[in-house]
Amino acid sequence: MFSKENRLEKFKDAETVIGSSIKVKGNFQGKGNIVIEGMLEGSVKTEANLFIGEDAKVVANIEATDSSIHGEVHGNVRSRGYLAIGKAARIFGDIQYSEISIEKGAIINGQLVAISESEKKAKGRKEEAPEETEEQE
């Protein structure tokens, strides 16, 4: 479907990279792209994109804009944009997505729930709404 080079292209400027020999515990929250090739336990939330490699093992709830999952995930996944699930992926948890593709061979043990357009718009308005101030005449 997509070559490895094309999949990784949007992640070349990743802000956080957890390499294949790395094991970490913690809660990650940020605005940049995240690449996980090792082991992570905790939670992951980014306003950008997330890539989980084939040999990665993640025990965490995940939230990102676009996500590409090719390894093992134990936890819920929320992808506000596009979610690509590779053939080697093993996901044990519920998945919320806007758009999704699943390669033959992927294993999913959980519910798939599409995020509605109204839910995306409401969340976007909530995040973008400036603080209200009263104007005096």
Image (tube, rainbow, N blue to C red):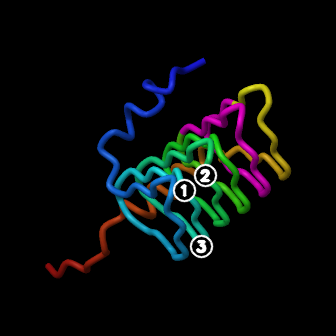
Point out the image quarter for the N terminus.
Answer: top right
- Label number found at residue 56: 2
Q: Is residue 38 magenta?
A: no
Give the residue number, with chain letter if any, for mark 3: 42
The residue under label 1 is which amino acid type? Answer: Gly
Front position among marks 2 and 3: 2
Could you say whether the residue bearing mark 1 is in a helix, strand or loop?
loop
39 and 10: which is toward the camera? 39
**Where does residue 112 sit, x and y in percent of width and height?**
78, 46
Residue at 62%, 46% in the rendered image:
55
Point out the image quarter for the C terminus.
Answer: bottom left
Q: Is residue 88 magenta?
A: yes
Q: Judge left or right: residue 12 versus residue 134.
A: right
How crowded pointer 2 is (Cα within 10 Å; few <14, some 14-19, many 20+) is rated as many
Q: Are marks 2 and 3 in contact (CB under 8 Å)?
A: no
Q: Are marks 1 and 3 in contact (CB under 8 Å)?
A: no
